Amino acid sequence: MTTTPETPAIPAGYMLDAKGRLVPETMVKPQERLEDQTVRKIIGFADALSAQIGRFKGHTFEDVATFMDLLADQYGAAKGGAKGNVTLTTYDGCMKVVVQVQDSITFGPELQVAKTLFDACISKWTEGSNDNIHVLVDHAFQVDKEGRINRSALFGLRRLDIADAEWQRAVAALNDSIRVIGSREYVRFYRRPNGRASWQAISVDLASAVAPANEGEAA
């Protein structure tokens, strides 16, 4: 029977059950043995494909980084600068690679101060005329089922052009509450038959692929 690094060697003629017990194959139903073989076969292919995608992911980021370093060298700029969004396109305009950097953020204790200040603004303003803003504030600070604040609504409050000193303090507290706790790179691929056609995405799921240990730095 096939084993993995997570499972011990199993003697011939036995199968390991979910409780870690050795069970003679003769005592396992034929359909259960067939199900076991089917899953192991599929997972074997999935592991190989995941490793291949992981290597491709690492090589892709390395190739883009190398190109950006060569470009920096051409213009006398420092190599290996801050990573950012970049799009590389073929000369005929029919293929492109898009690398995007997405920050992972959370909110600090200043967020509660911001909510208090926003509420104070609304309570002192004339009733009725600011009902819509009151709804916006309440919506922004609502917590979803996963316990997360409505980020898009919070950032929408920052864009409201309200010339009120207390409102501006609330926005400042909101800005100070934002913590960038990490970032992740994503890469997407597109092609089209000619320069006037619409782009079509090439479906490759890199977001969940795990690069091999020796290439983890590129992921």
Image (cartoon, helix red, strand yellow):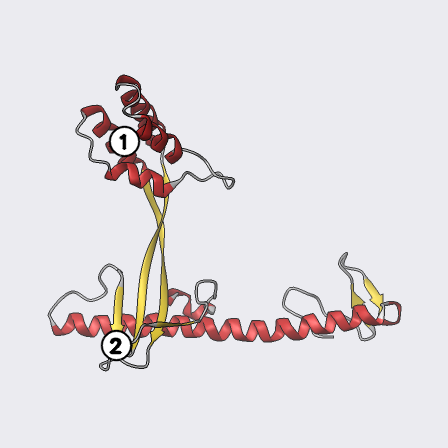
Residue located beneath label 2 in the image: 196
Which residue is pictured at 13% across the width and 66% down the height?
Answer: 77
Q: Residue furthest left?
A: 76
Amino acid type for the residue under numbered disc 2? Arg
Compared across the picture, whether 146 is left or right of 74 comes to right
Q: Which picture quadrant has residue 155?
A: top left
Q: Which picture quadrant has residue 31?
A: bottom right
Which residue is pictured at 33% across the width and 38% down the height?
Answer: 154
Q: Residue furthest right?
A: 27
Amino acid type for the residue under numbered disc 1? Ala
Residue 73, percent from left and from top: 15, 72
Residue located beneath label 1 in the image: 173
Which numbered disc, 2 or 1, marks the residue closer to the eye? 2
Q: Which picture quadrant has residue 219?
A: bottom left
Mark 2: give few (<14), some (14-19) or many (20+) Cα within 10 Å.
few
Compared across the picture, whether 58 is left or right of 46 comes to left
Residue 15, percent from left and from top: 79, 68
Mark earlier in primary sequence (2, 1): 1
In the foreground, 169 or 159: 159
Residue 102, percent from left and from top: 34, 55
Q: CA distance from mark 2 to mark 1?
A: 47 Å
- Please identify the quadrant where the N terminus is shown: bottom right
Query: Is label 2 in a helix, a strand or a loop?
Result: loop
Which residue is pictured at 33% across the width and 42% down the height?
Answer: 179
Q: Residue furthest front?
A: 128
Residue 193, percent from left and from top: 32, 81
Which residue is pictured at 50% across the width and 41% down the height?
Answer: 146
